[in-house]
Image: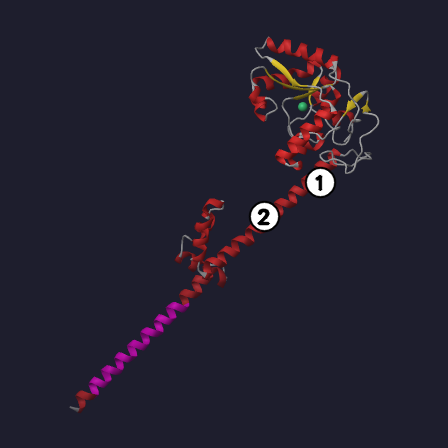
Amino acid sequence: MRNKKDESFARKRRGNNRWIDGVIVLLFIILVGSVIWIGTNGWSMQKAVDTIRNEADPTADFAEIEKPSDSDSADTTERSEENTSSSDVSSEERLREVEKPLIEEEQEEEAVQEEKSQGKAVPPNSVKPSNPTSYIKGQKLPEEPKLVQGILLVNKQYPLPEDYAPGESEEAREAFNELAASAVTSGINLQAFSTYRSYDYQVTLYNRYVERDGQEAADRYSARPGYSEHQTGLAFDIGEVNHEKHWASNSFGDTEAAKWLAANAHQYGFILRYPEGKEDKTGYMHESWHYRYVGKDKAEHIFKQNITLEEYLGVR
Ligand SMILES: [Zn+2]
């Protein structure tokens, strides 16, 4: 009986020992496993923990990328944010940290490019580093128009006297008639739908635009009274007969007529006054329909050099 008891006790003890051995082995495996896991993650504890988190929720990163940014889906974004766990928040923060310096870098690059382009635009001995895209605050209209190398210059820096009223230039009209006659041979019927505009008419026009779009927007496409090139009688807004929908519209730029004009107008003394990408020189956004008469020789030169009137005259 006693022997039997001893035997079963000994068995029990052996069983207990086996159980303890098992726990020790298991702990050892966990320890070695952890060390190896951290080792494969570059010995970074944070990285190792993050890897486990991302493996537990493989959609976490995709959810960040796919998160809609447009206002239509704003409420779905809010809902998903409510369900976000703390680990998602930390990965979101990490993403923001990555994005932030990138944005800052882009802005810095833009600023540098702006400086460069400004540096190029201002000749080293220029005394007027003013910005042609904006009006000079409180500037009064002059007594005399600005003439540079015999060319009448009108832009946001150089207005005309209020009483300057020459009417439409006969020379420019004749040149336009020649141009239009040439266009007809290519199957294009051109019409000058707006040429000379008086000071008073520009007052009406400008006020209408400001009322409709606000002053800032109006200043980008319409001149203030006294600052319109149309008051010189040398500016011709050109469109196609029976295609009024494209008159004074960006859509004109895509028409065959606009392409023909851009390629040939200089032969008749006209230049595209506000070319694409030259807003910083001319002060106006691109207008595919607005041509300015400067005479054949000058128009030829300006066309071949691919420059604006301001650049040709060396003014800003
Ligand atoms: Zn015009």
Looking at the rendered structure, the kind of residue marked 2 is Leu
Q: Kindly identify which residue carries mark 1.
A: 115
Q: How crowded is mark 1: few (under 14 residues within 10 Å), some or many (20 or more)?
A: few
Looking at the rendered structure, the kind of residue marked 1 is Glu
Q: Kindly identify which residue carries mark 2.
A: 102
Q: What stretch is highlighted in magenta?
A: 6-31
Residue 54 position (above or below residue 181): below
Observer-nearest residue: 107 or 145? Answer: 145
The residue drawn where x is 31% and y is 73% is 22
Please provide percent x and percent y for residue 3.
18, 89
> Left or right of 190: which side holds 49?
left
Observer-nearest residue: 271 or 8? Answer: 271
Q: Main secondary structure of the magenta part?
A: helix
The answer to whether residue 202 is seen in the rendering is yes
The residue drawn where x is 56% and y is 15% is 242
Q: Are marks 2 and 1 in contact (CB under 8 Å)?
A: no
Which quarter of the image is occupied by the N terminus?
bottom left
Please provide percent x and percent y for residue 134.
72, 36
Which quarter of the image is occupied by the C terminus?
top right
